[in-house]
Image (cartoon, rainbow, N blue to C red):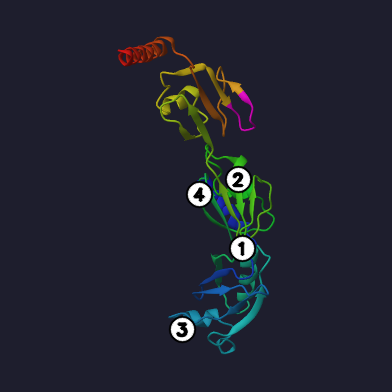
Amino acid sequence: MILLLLTFLTLNNYVLQPNDVVTISISGGVNFTYNQTISPQGSILIQWIPPSSVSMASKKESYQPLDRIQEWQVLKIVHIAGLSIEEAKLLIEENFKEYFKNISLSLTVASFSDLVYVTGRVHSSRGYPYSSGKSVREYIEVAGGPLKSADFKRIRIERKGGNIIEDSLELIVEPGDIITVPEALVYIRGEVRAPRAFSYDPDLKVEDYIGMSGGPTDRASFGKSYIIKRNGEKVSLKDATIDKGDTIVIGKVTFKWWQDYLTVASTITSIVIAWLTIRN
């Protein structure tokens, strides 16, 4: 519901541009529908499109008079670029009512001349009509807002021509921009069974990420473990909270007495036996 409302508000405030294609539907005393591409100069044609069938009774009430209007006749040229959809609708309707009685008009945009694409960790990844002066942040909100795992620190805007702009929520968007909201990750490495990156979840704690990594190895040392923050700062695991982009490092025991003594003793014994064998 929120997404539908945001999309409706965006279209309602959308400013019509040259090369947008609009659908004009006339109903009431006469009924017909046609598409018009807004010209490079910002205008459309007000014209009479003959319907497949119009009763003689409706003709008598709808035209002023019939002999003044020819099929496919261009009645007026109306400038609508720069107007909102509602403003353009009222203007077009006013002009049609000079020729047709008892009608109402609806105006929709069949296709937009320019789109802005929002992809990645948002609720609705797709193209949205370009609207002058809007920022990256506003387009993300139009796309339903970010998911919990969205990483605003690594937002990427790709412009026509391949120019890449990063980390700029307040950047004013241009036609054709591709806004990518990447997934926020938490990395875990060191003495765990399956080091890897995980999607950030604000509800998870350090121990949850360790568990998802298969748990600690038998040489893990939590006393030597720490978290590397995005800015490079190292913090202790104790009472630490996990933020987007953090790296959890599980330290290693350098000498585990009962295993390592046994390994060393076994190695020394093998060397002694080999030496004695050679001597004999």
Query: Observer-nearest residue: 67 or 270?
Result: 270
Residue at left 61%, top 63%?
85
**Distance Cα–Cα, label 1 vs label 4:** 23 Å
Please name the residue that numbered disc 3 is placed on: 56
Q: Nearer the viewer, mark 1 or mark 2?
A: 2
In the figure, residue 93 lies in which quadrant?
bottom right
Q: Which residues are magenta?
A: 228-234
Q: Amino acid at mark 2?
A: Ile
Residue at left 68%, top 50%?
171
Q: Earlier in the sequence, mark 4 or mark 3?
A: 3
Q: Is residue 71 above or below residue 31?
A: below
In the picture provided, is 2 more to the left or to the right than 263?
Answer: right
Q: Is residue 183 above or below residue 215?
A: below
Which residue ends up furthest to the bottom in the rendered image?
A: 67
Q: Earlier in the sequence, mark 1 or mark 4?
A: 1
**Distance Cα–Cα, label 1 vs label 3:** 33 Å
In the picture provided, is 59 more to the left or to the right than 88?
Answer: left
**Distance Cα–Cα, label 4 vs label 3:** 49 Å
Q: Amino acid at mark 4?
A: Ser
Q: Earlier in the sequence, mark 1 or mark 3?
A: 3
Q: Looking at the rendering, in which quadrant would you find the C terminus?
A: top left
Q: Residues within 10 Å of mark 2 (few under 14, many from 20)?
A: some
Q: Residues within 10 Å of mark 3 (few under 14, many from 20)?
A: few
Q: Nearer the viewer, mark 4 or mark 3?
A: 4
Q: Which mark is residue 155?
A: 2
Image marks 1 and 3: residues in contact by CB distance under 8 Å: no
Q: Considering the numbered disc 2 on the image, is that residue within a helix, a strand or a loop?
A: loop
Q: Amino acid at mark 1?
A: Ile
- Could you say where residue 211 lies in the image, as x and y percent from the top left? 42, 25
Q: Is residue 119 above or below residue 232?
A: below
Please name the residue that numbered disc 4 is placed on: 124
In the picture provided, is 219 more to the left or to the right than 94?
Answer: left
